[in-house]
Image (cartoon, rainbow, N blue to C red):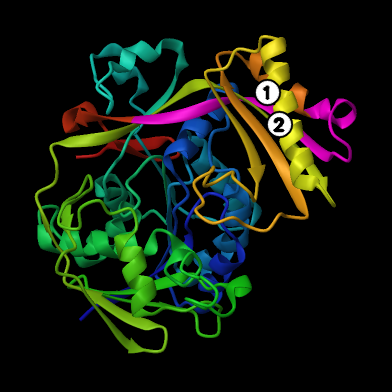
Amino acid sequence: MKRIRIGAGAGYSGDRLEPAVELVEKGDLDYLIFECLAERTIALAQRAHMQDPAGGYDPLLAERMRAVLAQCSEQGIRIVTNMGAANPLAAAAMVREIARSLGLEGLKVAAVIGDDVLDTLRAGQFMDDTGQPVNRLGERLLSANAYLGAQPLVEALAAGADVVITGRAADPALVLAPLIHEFGWAMDDWQRLGQGTLVGHLLECAGQITGGYFADPGYKDVAGLARLGFPIGEVAEDGSVVITKVEGSGGQVTAATCKEQLLYEIHDPRAYLTPDVVADFSGVRITEIGPDRVLVEGATGHPRPDTLKVSIGYIDSYIGEGQMSYAGPGALNRARLALSIVEERLKITGVQTSEIRYDILGVNAMHRDRLAAPHPEPYEVRIRVAGRTDSLREAARIANEVESLYTCGPAGGGGAFKSARDIVAVLSTLLPRDAVQASVHFGENQHAVT
């Protein structure tokens, strides 16, 4: 039975670079994926694109490609990534430039676009997932990106792409596309598409399944986290997969790490909605077959949804934040006094807020006053005041009141930090499939996706 090896080189935009290099050098891969987009990530990328028409792609794109492109080309490893974010065309142009600088002649780099549906949403009458009209956001609306499926990526691979760069595609589609291309699965083979989506879901967060997010000292100990190896999926033609990692790398692959990743972000294991299939993970079987080798099989699927999810990014409000540290005897009481001073000052000066928090980090910032038992008084604490406002000016006034504690507040305050910025939030809506048209671009050449 034919098998291919897919490595996951990143689980989010800021992920480590070395594990991907290790995968290329020692993983005997056929494909390397980089999954780098979250909901807020693409909204922030769209804002960066508006400020700079040549920007808007992943900040680490060039560094990642310089680290792996030459060896991937030499070994015939094809790269699939959503690092195009808000500007896949510019991202692809950047990769071509890097390839030329490395002397890699003839490397085919494809950009997949069509996920940007901002104009469609602005022109139509759509409701978001809170039941409110999307149009109410007006100028605060930053971005709207539909989750593309595997189809355009498959067409890019079929056209010979060595590197495929997308914007907003469903995370599992980065893995599902190579499987469809290599094994010739039909786009309505729901059982295999469901199993392939499971493989994508297991690999998409990279180090999470090799023990990173899994680790909990004394309860779930994991060795070698500073050299955490990223996962490899050995995928068979029937869609079954062995999850493993490079021998000697840090971390671990066990039935437990695979089970945790299987349940990650899954609302209903019987109906995991994706653009390609409604995957059913309720019958999945997980078996340890050797050290750091786990067989995962048994997923299936049902016909894909008629609509595509759209992630909407918008400016929700502004936040002003200030922090200050207190240490030594009486640190907690001085911190409490500092917060009471700031609270009174905001009232005296008339700062307008719609929401505000007064936290002492390490004491009540997470659980507020809900802790049942008293706890020892800490020797050092840090206060944090954060308020939501309708303007950047009001946000800055909150931050300034904390900083002024240096000389106007309790003794011994230090290490002040302040900031004022807008808050980019996300909503979702649904669009009919025929309202979204993807296309594949190879430099000047392009074709629409069927």
Residue 243, how many percent across, how many down? 36, 75
C-alpha separation, residue under disc 2 versus residue under disc 1:
6 Å
Residue 333, how many percent across, how many down? 76, 41
Please report the residue visible at 56 percent of the width from the left and 72 percent of the height from the top: 228
- The answer to if 312 sits in the magenta stretch is no
Q: Is residue 399 left or right of residue 186?
A: right
One can see residue 159 in this view: no
Residues 430 and 408: in front is 408
Residues 392 and 237: in front is 392
Name of the residue lying farthest toward the bottom: 290
Q: Which mark is residue 105?
A: none
Please report the residue visible at 28 percent of the width from the left and 52 percent of the height from the top: 154
Q: Is residue 182 above or below residue 307?
A: below
Q: Which mark is residue 339?
A: 2
Residue under label 1, please give it.
343
Q: Is residue 215 left or right of residue 39?
A: right
* Residue range corresponding to the magenta coloring: 403-427
Q: Is residue 152 above or below residue 377?
A: above
Q: Amino acid at mark 2?
A: Leu
One can see residue 54 in this view: yes
Q: Secondary structure at mark 1?
A: helix
Q: Are marks 2 and 1 in contact (CB under 8 Å)?
A: yes
